[in-house]
Amino acid sequence: MVVGPGDDAGPEVYPEGTPGSFRGFGVDLEVRLGSDRGTPAGRELPYGLAVGAWLLGRAGWADAPVEGLAVGEDLAAERCAEAGEALAGRAERVALLVMGDASACRSLKAPGYLDERAAPFDAELARALGAADTGALRALDTGLARELQVSGRAPWQVLAGAAAGNADLRGALLHEDAPYGVGYLVAGWS
C-alpha cells in the first residue's frame, strides 16, 4: 500500500493500475501504480502517490498487488489512525510506502518562507520516524503542520495507526535534508 497526501480530505483509495504523471511539475513522465491491469476509469494519482508509484517502478516492485491511499491535510488525527489500523487489519503482513514532505518553511527561499518553528518541528519528526515512535507521530499538531506546509502529517499518522500495538517495530532514519527549504526524511521500519 502506498500512502500519501491527497487533494481532498480522504481517505481515498486508488486501485492498482491507476495512472499518474509529473506534468504539473513540468516533467513529461507518466507512472502507473503497480502493474498494468487495465486503466481504472476516473482520476489520476495525486503527486505523493505518483512519487510512490515511480519509486516502486524504479525498484521493480512486482511481488504483490499494490493500492494507493490518499489522505488530505484536513483529515483528523483520529481518522488517520483509524485508517492505518484498518490497513493493518487487512492481512497478517502489510507493507506500507508512506510519502509526504516535512516542513516547507526552512529557509528564506522556501515555498512557505522562513518560519523559525520549522527546523525544530522537522527535528522532532526525524527523531520520531527514526525511533518508530508511533505516539509522537499520532500527536503531531495538525494546525502547526498546516502552518509549516507539512504534507506528510496525515500519511505519517496513518502509519502510526497501522503500527499501533507492534512493540517489536524498529526504525532507522536513513536520510535527512532540506534542499530549497523543504524538509525531506527517509526512514525504514521493520
Image (spheres, rainbow, N blue to C red):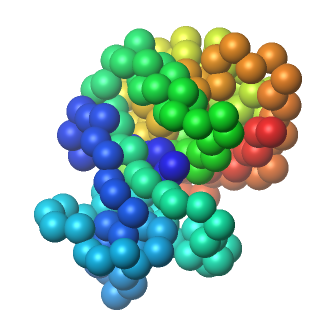
Residue drawn at x 48%, y 69% as measured from the top left:
34
- Residue at x 85%, y 23% (from the top left corner): 168
Q: List x then y, in percent, for residue 23.
A: 29, 78
Q: Would you place residue 111 above or below residue 119 in this image? A: below
- Left/right of residue 33 with respect to residue 72 in the rendered view: right
Identify the image quadrant of residue 77. Answer: top left
Taking the image as shown, residue 94 lies to the left or right of residue 131, namely: left
Residue 142, image x and y in percent? 40, 19
- Percent from the top left, x then y, of residue 63? 65, 66
Asked whether the viewer can see residue 116, the reply is no
Q: Which of 133 and 114 is in front in this view?
A: 133
Could one spot residue 91 in this view of the protein?
A: yes
* Position in image of residue 72 (x %, y %): 31, 36
> Which residue appears farthest toward the bottom when viewing the image?
28
Q: Image quarter for residue 18?
A: bottom left
In the image, what residue occupies the spot 40% across and 78% down?
36
State the quadrant of the C terminus: top right
At a point 37% along the width and 18% down the height, the residue shown is 79
Number of dots carrying numbers: 0
Q: Is residue 14 above or below residue 100?
A: below
Determine which quarter of the picture holds residue 149: top left
